[in-house]
Image (cartoon, grey):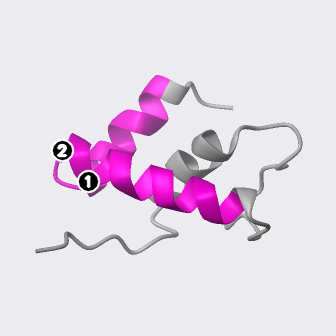
Amino acid sequence: MTRLEQVTAKALERLNHDRYLLTKAVGRRAEELNGGAAPLVDMDVKKHKATDIAIHEIAEGKLHIEKED
């Protein structure tokens, strides 16, 4: 598995290096995962934190994130 720092850098790249947007998106997705949503990547919810799964989903382009106005 790749290091979390590398995955986070890739996720930031996908969001035009907007750390605030990444933080907000990871938080929302982690809540969904903790609420029972199925992960969009091949990671076990019981073995990995919801935030780590969310970052992987964003880095791999599995989630469409839009900036709110």
* The C terminus, quarter of image: bottom left
Q: In the figure, residue 2 lies in which quadrant?
A: top right
In the displayed structure, does residue 48 sit left or right of residue 6? right
Residue 41 can be seen, yes or no: no
Foreground residue among 11 and 24 = 24
Q: Is residue 3 magenta?
A: no
* The N terminus, quarter of image: top right
Front of the two marks 1 and 2: 1
Q: Residue 12 carries which label?
A: none
Foreground residue among 66 and 7 = 66
Residue 4 can be seen, yes or no: yes
Stretch of the chain drawn in magenta:
5-33
Amino acid type, mark 1:
Leu
For the point 85% across and 49% down, which residue is it?
44
Q: In this view, does 62 lie above or below 29?
A: below
Q: Residue 40, position in %: x, y?
A: 67, 67
Q: In this view, does 7 lie above or below 58?
A: above
Q: In this view, does 1 lie above or below 20?
A: above
Q: Residue 17 carries which label?
A: 2
Amino acid type, mark 2:
His
Q: Which mark is residue 21?
A: 1
Q: Does the magenta stretch include residue 26?
A: yes
For the point 44% across and 29% down, which residue is it?
6
For the point 34% across and 35% down, which residue is it?
9
For the point 23% across and 41% down, which residue is it?
19
Foreground residue among 55 and 10 = 55
Estimate the spatial distance between the alpha carbons at disc 1 and disc 2, rounded to whole Å. Answer: 9 Å
Q: Residue 18, position in %: x, y?
A: 18, 47
Q: Is the magenta stretch mostly helix, strand or loop?
A: helix
Q: Residue 10, position in %: x, y?
A: 36, 43
